[in-house]
Image (cartoon, rainbow, N blue to C red):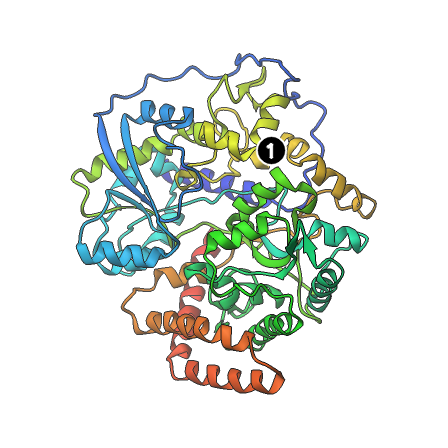
Amino acid sequence: MKRKLAACLLAGFMLALALSACAPPSPAPATEAPAPTSGATAVPTAAPEEPAKPERVPATITYLHSASATTTIDQWHDTPVGKALHELTNVDLSIEYLVGSDIRQKASLLIASDQYPDLINTADTSGDYYAAGALVPLDEYFDKYENLGAVYTPVFRKLLTQPDGHIYWFGGFPGENAVYPSAGYYLNMDLLKQNDYPVVTDFEQWQQMVIDYVAANPTFNDQPTIGLTEPAEAWRASAIQYGGSRFLMGNPNDGLTVIDPETLEAKIIMDSDFQKLFVKMLNRMYLEGVLDPELFMQTNDQYLAKIGTGRVAGLYDQRGSLQTAIDSLVANTPERNIVAFPVVLPGVTTERYRGPRSYSASQGLVVTVSAKNPDRVVQFLDDIASEEAQLIIRWGIEGEDWAYDADGKIVKSDEQWMAFRKAEFKQERGIEQLTWFYLRPGLEPLPTSGTILSPTNNEAYVLHAYSDAEKEFLSHYADRGYTTFCSWFKPSYDAYYEAGWAIRQRIATDDPRKIAGETALEITLEYLPKLTQAKDDAAFEAMWTEFTGKLADLPLREYEQLATEMAQASAKVYAAK
């Protein structure tokens, strides 16, 4: 019976994933109950009776979030969502955010002290904590706790299993978004307007448009226009170390490697020909005088602040890392917002910016050996994985932020959807702020209502998703069939192997091959400023030869072999689905 249940749950999950795409959702069927109109209150006639809540011993749990805070609001104690979760779980969650952006340094400090918070979201440091013996095995809990056991099916548990045969983290289900692409080469809306609203897919065209725009628009609001800026602080430097170039070749995000879609052979990016073309672009922008002169000296906050002023013409990045800057643009200069495009090199016929729909098996929530009562921490996570808690985290409070309609579907009024669009409102309410607790797949229809858990993947959201400035901008593309900001991107596809970035995180920190990859990143960041500021082609070529020579001294081919073996092994697990 358990196997049948697990199979059904997995089938439902994979079906929901298959429905996800970057194209605009189809119109709702005529029989679908409409969302309540402005000011209307839905009646939860079809909602099931709530079962009696189990008793929970009061507990205080310390938690480290491996990213910096995006607001000063205490999301657990000072928001309706946090307070509701506090009441539901009977847990007082003490949240510590990362100061700065170097999560590996934070992990090293904790490991050196051998003192940890009870609960950590590992991000890129799973291998560090695993190698240090800092994590509690979780195998026994999947059958002990109903919600976790239902979500983490046997197939997913196999993906989570580490080389020693144990599971150490509850992998996460990242938030999905049907109206914005997750990454791309961005251009300022004003630049696109001045170029008659093109769809930009060619790398050379993208560069030339940035250069020409700065020449024609040298200032904005009495400040110099910046043609191109990029992040270069700590892990955020991955955008220029390897992140931007992989997409130019039509590859998805496989970390510091590209993985051949047919053979699953992994190759390091940093010394590749296409990475050289990306760095040559930085050099060109520097020589043209349009590159941000502070690019290699700025913090990530300074980088985002510049973008938020509206004076940056172009950049490559992932939208999730840009959200603070985008919020500032929407609030202050919406007509100068930035738009992502699937830029590739000549001859590349397929782009994979949207990437695969995959489950994160290389990182997640871990219980540390410092936890005095690991069982209570896991019980807390089981409560968080419940449908009730997941609705609170993503949708807000029933009766205030959403309601059930007569057919038992979850709906929002027009006002509620409009409020949901505003970052400040969601921060004050706590909605979609505790993203590390996304312990159910966002595209999974909920058992009691059939509603897709992720609000941004519900059809009603698209009708309210865009600001007036965004709608006006998109109107210039409508006659070409582009109705959303990801209409010009290829849709996601089903994953069939473990992503390269996940493989990297699973390799033990003290493994010589892992060390080789991390050392290569350090060398790359050392040489990027020198390559970018090369005075001419000859100087660039000489510096590139010196740079790749240093990489050649590292056992990077061994790293590639290991990543290949792990990708090919994971493909067998995915095939079992």
Looking at the picture, does residue 441 appear above or below residue 419?
below
> Dot 1 corresponds to which residue?
458
128 vs 167, nearest the viewer: 128
Looking at the picture, does residue 268 appear above or below residue 234?
below
On the question of residue 270 being in view, the answer is: no
161 vs 509, nearest the viewer: 509
Q: Residue at 57% across / 42% down in the picture? A: 328
Label 1's element?
Answer: loop
Please indicate whether residue 318 sits to the left or right of residue 565 in the image.
right
Looking at the picture, does residue 280 appear above or below residue 100?
below
Please indicate whether residue 256 sits to the left or right of residue 65 in the image.
right
- Residue 524 image-quadrant placement: bottom left
Q: Residue at 54% across / 45% down in the picture? A: 323
On the question of residue 417 being in view, the answer is: yes
Looking at the picture, does residue 188 appear above or below residue 245?
above
Q: Residue at 60% across / 48% down in the picture? A: 309
Tell me where residue 387 appears, x and y as whole percent. Answer: 42, 29
Please indicate whether residue 564 sits to the left or right of residue 222 in the image.
left
Tell me where residue 224 appears, x and y as whole percent. Answer: 64, 58
Tell me where residue 440 appears, x and y as whole percent. Answer: 43, 38
Please indicate whether residue 197 sits to the left or right of residue 286 in the image.
right
Tell me where residue 110 appears, x and y as whole percent. Answer: 23, 54
424 vs 178, nearest the viewer: 424
Other-residue count near label 1 (Cα within 10 Å), few / some / many at <14 / 14–19 / ≥20 = some
Q: Amino acid at mark 1?
A: Asn
Q: Quadrant of the N terminus?
A: top left
